[in-house]
Image: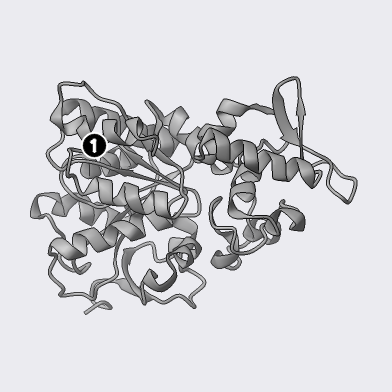
Amino acid sequence: MLDRLGGSLLTPDDARWPGRLVDLGAEEPFALWVRGDPDLAALVERSVAVVGARASSAYGDQVASGVAAGLADRGFTVVSGGAYGIDAAAHRGALAGGAPTVAVLAGGVDRFYPPGNAELLRRLADGGGAVVSEVPPGSAPFRQRFLARNRIIAAASCATVVVEAAWRSGALSTARHATRLLRPLGAVPGPVTSGTSTGCHVLLRDGAAVCVTDAAEVAELAGPYGTGAVAGPADAEGGHGDPRASGSPAAGTTPRAGRPEEVDALDERARRVWDALPARSSAALDALIRTAGLSIAETLAGLGDLELHGLAAQDGGRWHRGTRRTGRRG
């Protein structure tokens, strides 16, 4: 059936497998069925998940579409769930911006759901990106599969942004996965009288998410990927290389090109702060906090570890990468 649909089956040992999914540990999918571009590793290498309420408002749809189009202009792939509301607005915004977009479905890739988005999902499968599922063709979507696919959306992306979410929105499940995986998390504020923004306000109030209002701020949230500063192994060789070695800013599972071995020997917190530091300039503490997605205390502790190892230094209240042990600048 998959051959008839022009689809592909990927497994973790495939070079096209998204390397960040390894961060899920025992929850990493055993396989992914794909319609569209089968090279998911390349598609999501520089990506942001844009998710939110199904029963979205006109305000939410406009923001989601605008953010997605702005991310497309900056070379990002937009990842979402193909649902009504914010998901659909994000996919359409990315397509309008001329960039690929990926929809992770709760059912099989042969059953476009919801039916009202079938034409949109077909555009993705026919060249606008990819439609992906961890369950085989013929599988029907149901509640637990919707919740399960959220972990893939969060894990595959460099960062996650919640545009609108009610108090018990499924988008908050994606946000929780992003937090657990140490992915940067952003939330768009809405009117205090709007029930569709209640979940976003909870994320902001609890300090789980950074406030973002446009594509530029979302790109900043994505950290080094927002500036294109991080070069994976593929960039050095002119190919895709091993997707598991490219990782995400939060993964830290293998050394990355452009990062000294001393950093990879440090804890996760210090590695995230290092990745947030600009490669050739300096940054204020508040900018590092937003980019790393850490608290003030965690960011300061990470900077302290880096400074102790000669990997970061402060100058006039701004932080920059310090001299490595090799004597070169970071």
Note whether residue 311 is visible.
no
Choose top left, top right, bottom left or bottom right for residue 60.
top left
The residue shown at (22%, 39%) is 86
Q: Would you place residue 204 above or below residue 153 in this image?
A: above
- The percent position of residue 268, horizontal first and vertical second, equals 59, 53
- Say which quadrant the C terminus sits in: top right
- The percent position of residue 137, horizontal first and vertical second, equals 20, 74
**Mark 1 Cα within 10 Å, few/some/many (few <14, many 20+)?**
many
The residue tagged with tag 1: helix, strand or loop?
Answer: helix
Residue closer to the observer: 230 or 237:
230
The residue shown at (25%, 52%) is 81
Q: Would you place residue 153 above or below residue 135 in this image?
A: above
Residue closer to the observer: 68 or 51:
51
Choose top left, top right, bottom left or bottom right for residue 156.
bottom left
Note whether residue 51 is visible.
yes
Q: Residue furthest left?
A: 115
- Say which quadrant the N terminus sits in: bottom left
Residue closer to the observer: 56 or 201:
201
> Relative to 139, is 78 on the left or the right?
right
Q: Would you place residue 273 above or below residue 24 in this image?
A: above
The residue labelled by disc 1 is 199
Amino acid type, label 1 = Gly
